[in-house]
Amino acid sequence: MSDSSTDTSSADPRIAVVGPGAIGTTITAALHAAGRTPALYGRTAREELELLVGDERIVVPGPVHTNPDEVSATADVVFLAVKATQIDAAAPWLDALCGPGTVVCVLQNGVEQVALVSPHVGDAVAVLPSVVWFPAQAQADGTVRLRGDARLTIPAGEDAERIAAVLDGTLCRVEQASDFAAMAWRKLLQNAAAGLMALTGRRAGAFHRDDLGDLTRAYLRECAAVALAEGVALDDGVADEILAGFRSSPADLSTSILTDREAERPLEWDVRNGVVSRLGRRHGIPTPVSDIVTTLLAATSDGPG
């Protein structure tokens, strides 16, 4: 851990982004365009990041730092934008960047963000989960295209006010939700269904198939039953709403778990899909569709073979 302390009273807070992938690049570009360029940290050295928003091109100067030992001061706000499969690898960055006044905002999938990240943040004052709603896709040339509005949902409170202040006036809109758990579970259902894209190797257009639509509804109803056992009551029509969302999307819209499969990277199958089966077993709720989907995704991700 760096010996430098975090000055939470600074008018210009020190901001760090760990993991400048599609989501991290979007947050970084939003901050840069508003005059609040963050320090960048990741596993791959890059001289700049580039976000495409419609006809606009936002270029963020680097570099992306790759050595945690070079961090000289802690940050006021850290946006952690690595995938859940990369948390352990990002731990040295968190150790170097987090101090007694740091708020870590986790830009990650799942409903277990606080539990997974908290062991790695040392004296940070808070780990704030979030729901990322924006469709950002990495392009073959290394740029990132934002294919819709950027919106971030975080649980209402004092720590959320700090995140909202940092992103105020940027292209990323922040919502503070008193019912954050419901929002997080709804996004989990959307991500769980998107796992079917990784299994089929198809993009959003595949959901127009009647048979895949029926499977998706059955799967999402299982997920909603587990959410209810966890104390989160979702709308009765949530399965149909999520399916309709996929069907109204551009047919070529991808998702990060499909992109990872195409690139032969490890998949976030556990935090997006496995969690439903795990919690279902805890509550004694049968999840037959989830169990099959999770098994297939785990094998697709981790092998062997």
Image: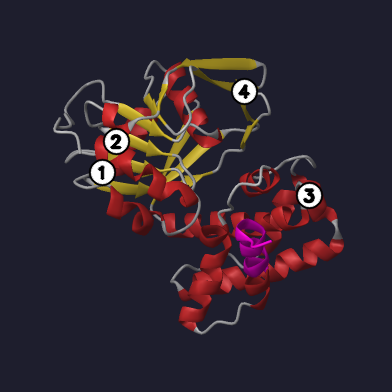
In the image, what residue type sits under mark 1?
Glu
Q: Do the residues labelled 1 and 2 touch (CB within 8 Å)?
A: yes
Decide which of 233, 133 is in the foreground and name it.
133
Could you tell me how far apart the alpha carbons at marks 3 and 4 are, in whole angstroms? Answer: 24 Å
Start and end of the magenta stretch?
293-305
Give 71 or 157, whichever is nearer the viewer.
71
Disc 4 versus disc 1: nearer the observer? 4
Horizontal and vertical percent position of residue 112: 42, 59
Judge left or right: residue 87 versus residue 109.
left
Residue that mark 2 sits on: 162
Residue neighbourhood size for the residue with mark 4, other residues' Cα within 10 Å, grouped as few (<14), some (14–19), many (≥20) = some
Mark in front: 4 vs 2: 4
Q: Nearer the viewer, mark 3 or mark 4?
A: 3
Q: Give me the residue at 19% from left, 24% from top.
A: 10
Along the line of sight, which residue is nearer the eye, 60 or 103? 60
Secondary element at tag 1: helix
Task: Name the disc covering residue 158, or none.
Answer: 1
Would you identify the image quadrant in which residue 222 lies? Answer: bottom right
Q: Name the residue under label 3.
A: 202
Residue 53 horizontal side relative to residue 114, left or right: right
Q: Where is residue 169 in the image (x, y as percent from the top left)?
A: 42, 23
In the image, residue 290 sits, relative to residue 98, either above or below, namely below
Magenta stretch: includes residue 278: no
Element at badge 3? loop
What's the distance in space between the residues labelled 4 and 1, CA to CA? 31 Å
Instruction: Kindly give the residue lying farthest to the bottom in the view shown.
Output: 284
Q: Does the magenta stretch include residue 301?
A: yes
Say what amino acid the circle numbered 2 marks: Arg
